[in-house]
Amino acid sequence: MINYTTLIFLGFLSFPAKAGELDSRAMEALLVKSLNSVGSNRLDTALSEVNALLKANPNFKLAQMLKGDLLMARAKPLSGFGNDPDAPSDRVNDLRDEARARLQRVQQQPVTAAPRFIWQLDPQQRYAIVVDTSKSTLYLYENVNGAPRYVENFYISVGKKGSDKNVEGDQKTPLGVYYVNAYLSKKQLTDFYGSGAYPINYPNEWDTRLGRNGHGIWLHGTPSDTYSRPPLSSNGCVVLSNDDLSHLGKSLQVGTTPVIITNRMEMSDDADKADQAALLKSIEQWRSDWSGRNTDSYLTHYASDFASGNFKLDTWSAQKRLVNSGKSWIKVGLSDVSIFPYPNQPNLVVVNFEQDYASNNLENRMKKRQYWIKRDNRWQIVYEGAAT
Amino acid sequence: MNILLPTHIPKTTQMIRFNRFNQRAALCALLLYFSMISVADEMQDANKLFKQGQAAQALSKADAILANKPKDAQARFLKALILAEQGQSDEAVRLFTALTEDHPELPEPYNNLAVLYANQGQYEKAKIALEKALRTHPSYSTAHENLGDIYAKMASQAYDRALQLDRSKSSSTTRLALIKDMHSPVAKSNTGKIQIASVNNPPAAVASPTVSTPVATITIAATTTPAAVTSAAPTNDKPVTTAAANANDDVLKAVNDWAKAWSSRNAGKYLAMYAKDFKTPNNEARSSWEQQRRDRIGKPQPIVVSIANARVKMLDDSHASVSFIQSYRSGALSSTTRKTLVLSRSNGAWQIQSEQTGAK
């Protein structure tokens, strides 16, 4: 329960003074500054700060709520946040949650270290996204020689019922490794989605394997009369303010940019690096076993519960033995490798690469996706298929 | 609800009332000092007609006065009021605006302008008008209270935007209403001498320094009270006597002490300000009321109580009523309340017999 008098106060925040040209970060900083002014009983200061915010964006509902409280404070004693006696309590609670989320965002320094969820980016991927649903924050990383470098972060809203989507209509945001797979412009959408939308590929191969369903998980904007939405307010989509979505859009590549959604941000550490090295070694071993037509060895890389489409381990093994025995030579080359540890699934990683296959009677180049899992200290493949 | 207590209404004022959000008391009659008795008589008739509900006749009377004296402030004021009453708010706004331009020292036209603006949903304009009224008369309680209502209304607008509610449609069909028990300023004074309560004389008028009331502000820090405070709103034609003034000073000092004890969270001293026969607010037992007050006052948060616009009315030698605007602030809470204390004197000490909170 947020209460003005119990807010934890920040030090001084700097923000551009140009009203009307505040970006989302400056808006948020000014909002928090104003909340702090309320907390320290400088109501007039708070009101002028809120007025500056609303001048820049009259559709910032949380700021309107704060303004209402500040004006009401001049008319009668206030009992707390959202003093309108006729206000629907769920909406007041929503705005209170947004205030809390934004306060936390400003109070906590943005996490600029490398997240655990990006081990390697391929050279085509200029940027990567990590969404932390618990922090109402989307982080953008730039690809620097395959490693993520923090660029910026944005306030976001996620599903009404939180995260870890499982079934259609559960109003949750999925957790996992996804990719932006389309772009819908403002013209193609109703006002509800704002300045544009970037659908992601939920349910992915892992979701399908677990029997999860549902569809239509997008990154999208807000209606024209709404600057931002409460932290938990979508039906599972990740919602950004229109300005932020348009800005972020410049960094997104359809079919390429990974969107990793977690409910707990984690940073990369030394154990990670060891795991990563072991995995790379396993991938290379898998490639060379295949190239060497060393089928027994090759098949040891697949887990007992391996599944790909209609194949299980036994049918997959039979098929591979049959194919490989008919070859006099095989060459397999891997390039553009990307590796993303799976959020909320310990020891599971998603590996993508460009596979260049050649043999005495077939040549094939494809984008491939594998899910590797570490069991008994050994990396094994649980899924393999074309990357769509 | 937000009804002005009779003791707060200077006898010489009239007020219009604003039904929608209980906006109080735009003063109707300007308390002007007329240079011509005949105009005063005419004006008296016009006011009387208006009071009797004969708006059309009152309007033609006012127009007749204005034909001779186009600048007559009170006639212009009455005309504006009648037009407002008749729903011609644009014209009323124009007249009141002109009055504020010619008599920027008068708070009433600003106040009524604010009421009209508020009725049109133009709260920002209403707020500015009231702030101007308060700039000339910082202690003008009606403007204070109306401003409180405007803030509440603006707050409500902001809430609507915050919560995507649309309540504006339901509340836009309101109009000014006239309070029935208006007092005509002239009717009481056959001698042609008009008492001036809270309004300063316009520049053209002859000043009457003994009764014009400057801003009366008492803060708890002040140990002595400006003498001007005691001259507020005399209720009869008798000049304020020295003895009465002294009694007034004592009463005000008691009220100051009470506010000071409250501010310093000295519950013992605070409670000692209440007479044995003090009428508890909900007729509860004195002991349980005292306990409530102790709990409230004893909280660790700082309390700041200040008093403004105090008006003392001697009921008899040992009884007085004091009305004032009380500002209370504790933590994030603040309130401005109209309050009336009735005090009685026993053994030379003034103690509170009853405490009445009006409005808010």
Image (tube, grey):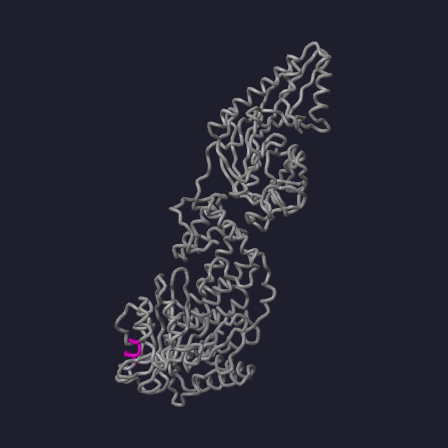
Q: Nearer the viewer, residue B177 or A197?
A: A197
Is residue A243 at all visible to an observer of this figure?
Answer: yes
Asked whether residue A378 is drawn in magenta, I would say no
Where is A77 relative to A118, above or below? below
Residue furthest front in the image: A376
Kindly indicate the quadrant of the structure image that contains residue B331.
bottom left
Q: Nearer the viewer, residue A249 or A107?
A: A107
Is residue B137 at all visible to an observer of this figure?
Answer: no
Q: Percent from the top left, x then y, of residue B297?
A: 36, 67
Quarter of the figure with the C terminus of chain A? top right
Q: Percent from the top left, x then y, of residue B78?
A: 49, 78
Q: Percent from the top left, x then y, of residue B148?
A: 45, 67
Q: Nearer the viewer, residue B43 or A337?
A: A337
Magenta stretch prevailing secondary structure: helix
Residue furthest top in the image: A328
In the image, taking residue B350 as reference, residue A173 lies left or right, namely right
In the image, taking residue A206 as reference, residue B296 lies left or right, namely left
Q: How many marks?
A: 0
In the image, taking residue B216 as reference, residue A68 lies left or right, namely right
Where is A256 relative to B94, above or below? above
Where is A67 relative to B18, above or below? above
Q: Percent from the top left, x then y, of residue B301?
A: 36, 61
Kindly indicate the quadrant of the structure image that contains residue A178.
top right
Kindly indicate the quadrant of the structure image that contains residue A70.
bottom left
What segment carries the magenta color? B248-254
Residue drawn at point x = 44 percent, y = 67 percent:
B130
Q: Nearer the viewer, residue A232 or B339?
A: A232
